[in-house]
Image (spheres, rainbow, N blue to C red):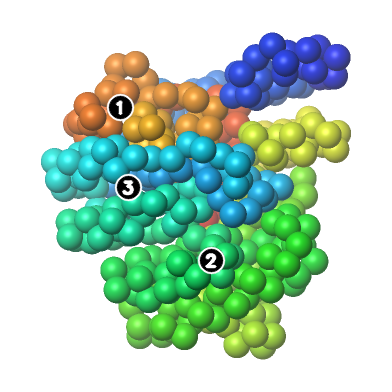
Amino acid sequence: MALSATSLHRQKHELSEPAYQLTVLQQGAQFPEFAAQLQQHNLYPLKPTGATILQVNVGKMCNQTCRHCHVDAGPDRKEIMTRETMQLCLDALVKSPDITTIDLTGGAPEMNPDFRWFVEELSKLGKQIVVRCNLTIILANKKYHDMPLFFKEHKVQVVSSLPYFAASRTDAQRGDGVFDKSIKALQLLNEVGYGKAGSGLQLDLVYNPSGAFLPAAQQSLEAEFKRRLKSGFDIDFNNLFCITNLPISRYLEYLMQSGNYESYMEKLVDAFNPAAAASVMCRNTISVGWDGYLYDCDFNQMLELHVSPTAPQHIRDFSLAALNKRDIILNQHCYGCTAGAGSSCGGQTVA
């Protein structure tokens, strides 16, 4: 069934943005329900394998407004995690030794006024800290210029988006001048040891396709990125993570406006891989929203799909044992994480 532009336009004004997006996901061409796909492979209900990662969105404020951003982040967003909620996260981690990695995201997480305090407190707990840095924030204001040294001090793993190794594609997706600023920021990270062999300082890049297609093979893309960035800019990094764009938020809007929604969904459905479905990140990750509410993943968070009502709903009530027993909440956008080699915040999930 084709999407009715008139009907959807009316619903966009009647519904909240997350509710509208869920409506689009359900009203497209009659693709198989994602849950039904899992049932065929004895994966339903989808259950956690045991959470080891707590991904925390510390706010939606960002110095950029990227076309593909599933958070819909930007300079005008006011949602920001308070120090009180951060303390609740710390309290939960003290009680949950099985969670070994804290993945900080945004927006630009560095723009949260308590970001440095939070990293320092997480460092005291001995957790592996991942920061999803958009690179340009390092150059945005002098108060961020020392971020490479701050990251180094706390042995933060830096994961940064770089859509391509050339300016044209990067700027088209992330804004004019972003490529040149990103290159400069990567060079500053290299100067303090990030991405250098033997330094112990991890610098990973993220690739998202710029159009309505799936990413190419991660291994071959990583080799090409390393060759081009080294020869062109003397930049070193550790890994390239290929992440499939999920049909939500700004990317969903792009698909709708360009007439690519149904064909893109068809690509995702046709590429469904049960091995990728068995390895999705929601099985070992719990996502915390800026206001402390809990989700199965960062994508569900943006659609306001909270964890199962049988599990704790807020970080103040955090119980890893209870959360590890929950059923994971699913919808049609989940096809994005299970297409081809799979997709997660750490790149592809299967060889």
Q: Amino acid at mark 3?
A: Ile
Which residue is found at the position 41% from the left and 37% from the top? Answer: 290
Tell me what residue is drawn at x 38 percent, y 25 percent: 307
Query: Taking 272 as reference, is 10 left or right?
Result: right
| Residue that appears at 37% across and 76% down | 149
How would you rate the neighbour count of disc 3 (Cα within 10 Å): few for under 14, some for 14-19, many for 20 or more?
many
Q: Quadrant of residue 33?
A: top right
Residue 53, labelled with which disc? 3
Q: Is residue 338 left or right of residue 2?
A: left
- The residue that label 1 is drawn on is 314
- The answer to whether one can see residue 341 in this image is no
176, above or below 192, in the image: above
Residue type at numbered disc 1: His
In this orientation, which residue lies closer to the viewer: 86 or 102? 86
Q: Quadrant of the N terminus?
A: top right
Of labels 1 and 2, earlier in sequence is 2
78 vs 236: above or below: above
Q: Could you tell me which secondary element the residue under label 1 belongs to?
A: loop
Amino acid at the residue labelled 2: Asn
**Element type at mark 3:** strand
Q: Nearer the viewer, mark 1 or mark 3?
A: 1
Query: Which residue matches tag 2?
Result: 141
Q: Earlier in the sequence, mark 1 or mark 3?
A: 3
* Circles 2 and 3: CB atoms closer than 8 Å: no
Question: In the figure, is residue 91 to the left or right of 85?
Answer: left
